[in-house]
Amino acid sequence: DKQAKPSVRKGNGGEWHQEAKSTKERMTTNQGVVVSDDQNSLKVGGRGSTLLEDFHLREKITHFDHERIPERVVHARGYGAHGYFQAYESHASLTKAAFLQNPSEKTPVFVRFSTVAGSKGSPDTARDVRGFAVKFYTQEGNYDLVGNNMPVFFIQDAIKFPDLIHAVKPAPDRDFPQAQSAHDSFWDFVSLMPESMHMLVWVMSDRAIPRSLRMMEGFGIHTFRMINADGESTLVKFHWRPKQGIFSLIWDEAVVISGADPDFHRRDMWNSIEAGDYPEWELSVQVFTEEEANKFDYDVLDPTKLIPEEDVPLTPLGKMVLDRNVDNFFAETEQVAFCPANIVPGIDFSNDPLLQGRLFSYLDTQLTRLGGPNFQQIPVNQPKCPMQNLQRDGHMQMDIPKGRVSNEPSSLDDGLPRECDKTGFKSYPEKVSGEKLRIRPESFADHYTQARLFYKSMTGYEQDHIAGGFAFELGKCQKIEVRERMIAHLLNIDKELAGKVADNLGMNTNVEPIKPAVPVKDMPLSDALS
Ligand code: HEM
């Protein structure tokens, strides 16, 4: 009580000032000099002027002035936690990745969930895709599985990502938050991008307003490759399934919660971990060969397509438990740097053109966001296995490497780190050949079949929610041509859906049709759904 209570005492100049009594730790400047008075700046006499020589005042305010770093260009609002991953058994036949071999080993993880479009201060329950990014601190280096809570994406090629994000973010002239300005630019953009249709049905569904971050799925989206110790490769898609079940809000709840408690999801996550009610997910993969992939009606390199579980069932790999909240939001959740290019031996990329662009983008943006090339040294980003190479210097270098040589080959220093052919990462020697072209393959051309499949796999009330989502969002869109174009797309997905949306908007479905590039098919629904 004595410690917490501020006392009032007379200052040197006869002024009154506050002093919080503390018997323990001494406050110092960043240079370690003990601070005698943190209540008053240094002045001439009692009433000033204030002296430029007051190094404590200047240091304190300078540091404060630089407290903010740029928010992420996308996924700015996020929430993180620590935990572990544990494989159920050895998956040696599939991959040589060390963290998938030993069921008694727990691999530490850091996970950040996020919304995509909103700024750092936007509400948690906005209708949006959720990021689901996992950093596995494996014995062989950091492996990042940077996914979302939906199994497909808006675009097929990374070159369209800046356009997609510009369309969804506040307009450059008025900077309204996404709820107003983006309706025209976003719906105009996607209505001109038929490849977005499948994702749009997901985004208008209840999946875009999860009840809790603990109650949503995660997906790696792209096809990846796994390689075993014999060098044999299979293709995989990653899935996270929450043990808590999958639950969503309904739109009216989401809107009320956005106003009443914009921190709804982060509070829920923090509270459940603090209470020892640790959220858990199962990691599975769909495993398939290139020969099987060639027989599918869709291209497994197209990130706007999923692989129905009727075609390839899930193989469970292990579980992830989140059991520790961060000590410091900024140091950990804000400074964590995920990157799809962070990969370990036994896992490899595919040629999905969206993934290939992502492999460049994350490190590039983090060089700006985290102030230079040494952000790997921030504790949350450091690997938890030995890490050494000959890179040196740069902004915010924290290490003091010993020795006079930072090049190889070199005969001057026997202790230099060297490459290791046996345990080092080797890219899968996939055969590639072809002409250099800027084209979209024809196998990417079917934009409606899977959108229809997803819509049809929903229950009646979920279908109503999807129609309601489209009608609400398009109702905010001022350009009638854009609404009509969207209704034309919806007609290709499902006539009843298009009718419901048109009705709701006070329009009809007599709009100029959009001819699908390839005929839309009816894919079989699973027995449970049909
Ligand atoms: C951030 C997922 C596509 C560029 C993120 C984050 C996630 C994510 C989860 C947040 C990471 C965190 O919590 O810090 C995805 C998924 C995609 C996708 C699943 C498609 C399947 C793309 C593409 C690009 C891109 C195509 C660029 C070509 C970025 C950038 C960030 C980001 C620049 C910010 C990274 C940072 O500042 O640390 N993405 N993304 N993303 N993504 Fe993506």
Image (cartoon, rainbow, N blue to C red):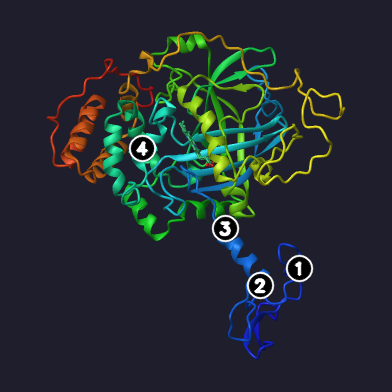
Q: Position of residue 152 (x, y in %)?
A: 42, 29
Taking depth in this image into account, of 350 and 362 the one nearest to the observer is: 362
Quick one: quadrant of the C terminus?
top left
Q: Position of residue 178 (x, y in %)?
A: 34, 48
* Mark closest to the chain's N terminus, 4 or 2: 2
Tell me the residue that label 1 is attached to.
33
User: At label 2, which amino acid type do we have?
Assistant: Asp
Q: Secondary structure at mark 2?
A: loop
Tell me the residue that label 3 is attached to.
67
Q: Circle 3: is it few (<14), some (14-19), or many (20+) Cα within 10 Å?
A: few
Determine the CA span between mark 1 and mark 3: 22 Å
Q: Circle 2: is it few (<14), some (14-19), or many (20+) Cα within 10 Å?
A: few
Taking depth in this image into account, of 458 and 476 the one nearest to the observer is: 476
Determine the CA span between mark 1 and mark 2: 13 Å
Residue 348 in the image: above or below residue 118 = above
Q: In the image, which disc is placed on residue 203? A: 4
Q: Residue at x 53, y 12 (%)?
A: 289
Viewer-nearest of discs 4 and 2: 2
Can you tell which quarter of the image residue 470 is in?
Answer: top left
Q: Position of residue 337 (x, y in %)?
A: 59, 41
* Mark closest to the chain's N terminus, 1 or 3: 1
Q: Circle 4: is it few (<14), some (14-19), or many (20+) Cα within 10 Å?
A: many
Can you tell which quarter of the image residue 349 is in?
Answer: top right
Quick one: quadrant of the N terminus?
bottom right
Q: Circle 1: is it few (<14), some (14-19), or many (20+) Cα within 10 Å?
A: few
